[in-house]
């Protein structure tokens, strides 16, 4: 495994839709391993492949404890409700904003074995999934933020430290 550099400053690969994964080959598996290590090193809770410069439809999200969920070609099959919350992003250090997201999502994807996975999530996990799938469309949270939030304002809000 190796650490990869997380791109920021609106690098072009972050601003365009990522390519569907056709074949889960060794390169894809190595990328997944590297993304795990890179996200852990950055204390992030989610990471999309194009954040490390690879334009492929792959995301990983931390589901709370030690578990990391790896999703290849993920898409949102269903959404429910709406919730506004503060988000940050590993690619936009020091920036935070309030974003409206679906409260619950159902996501379909492939796992690293190429098997179908079907994931239901709500709350913070649902938010992270939507944030990461947006990355795959070339969309950053700042494109959708209802308003940006001053980092000092966040001291009182706990969720704010999460970076995706
Ligand atoms: Zn992000």
Image (cartoon, rainbow, N blue to C red):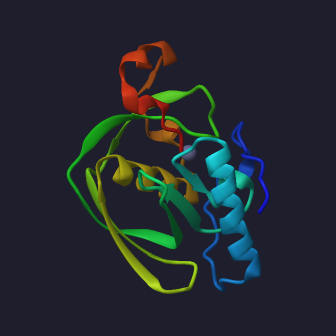
In the image as oriented, which residue stretches furthest toward the left? 81
Image quarter of the N terminus: bottom right
**In the image, residue 117 above or below residue 160:** below
One can see residue 55 in this view: no
* Horizontal relation, residue 46 to residue 82: left or right: right
Residue drawn where x is 35% and y is 54% of the image: 126
In the image as oriented, which residue stretches furthest toward the top? 152
156, 149: nearer the viewer:
156
**In the image, residue 38 above or below residue 19:** above
Q: Quadrant of residue 157?
A: top left
Residue drawn where x is 47% and y is 50% of the image: 131
Q: Quadrant of residue 108?
A: bottom left
Q: Quadrant of residue 78?
A: bottom left
Residue drawn where x is 59% and y is 67% of the image: 58
Q: Position of residue 85 (x, y in %)?
A: 34, 35
Q: Quadrant of ligand 1?
A: top right
* Horizontal relation, residue 59 to residue 38: left or right: left
Q: Position of residue 110 (x, y in %)?
A: 50, 79
Q: Position of residue 127 (x, y in %)?
A: 38, 49
Q: Position of residue 19 (x, y in %)?
A: 64, 71
132, 144: nearer the viewer:
132
Residue drawn where x is 76% and y is 76% of the image: 27
């Amino acid at each position: 495994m190796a650490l990869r550099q997380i791109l920021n400053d609106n690098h072009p690969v972050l601003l365009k839709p990522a390519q569907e994964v056709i074949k889960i080959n060794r390169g894809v598996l190595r990328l997944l391993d590297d993304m795990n290590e890179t996200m852990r090193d950055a204390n992030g809770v989610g990471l999309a492949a194009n954040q490390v410069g690879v334009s492929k439809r792959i995301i990983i999200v931390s589901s709370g404890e030690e578990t990391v969920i790896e999703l290849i070609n993920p898409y949102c099959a269903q959404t429910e409700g709406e919730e506004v919350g503060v988000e940050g992003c590993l690619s936009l250090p020091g920036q935070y904003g309030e974003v409206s997201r679906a409260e619950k999502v159902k996501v379909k994807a492939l796992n690293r074995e190429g098997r179908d996975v079907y994931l239901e999530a709500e709350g913070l996990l649902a938010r992270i999934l939507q944030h990461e799938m947006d990355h795959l469309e070339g969309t950053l949270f700042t494109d959708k933020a209802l308003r940006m939030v001053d980092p000092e304002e966040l001291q009182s809000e706990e969720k704010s430290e999460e970076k995706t």
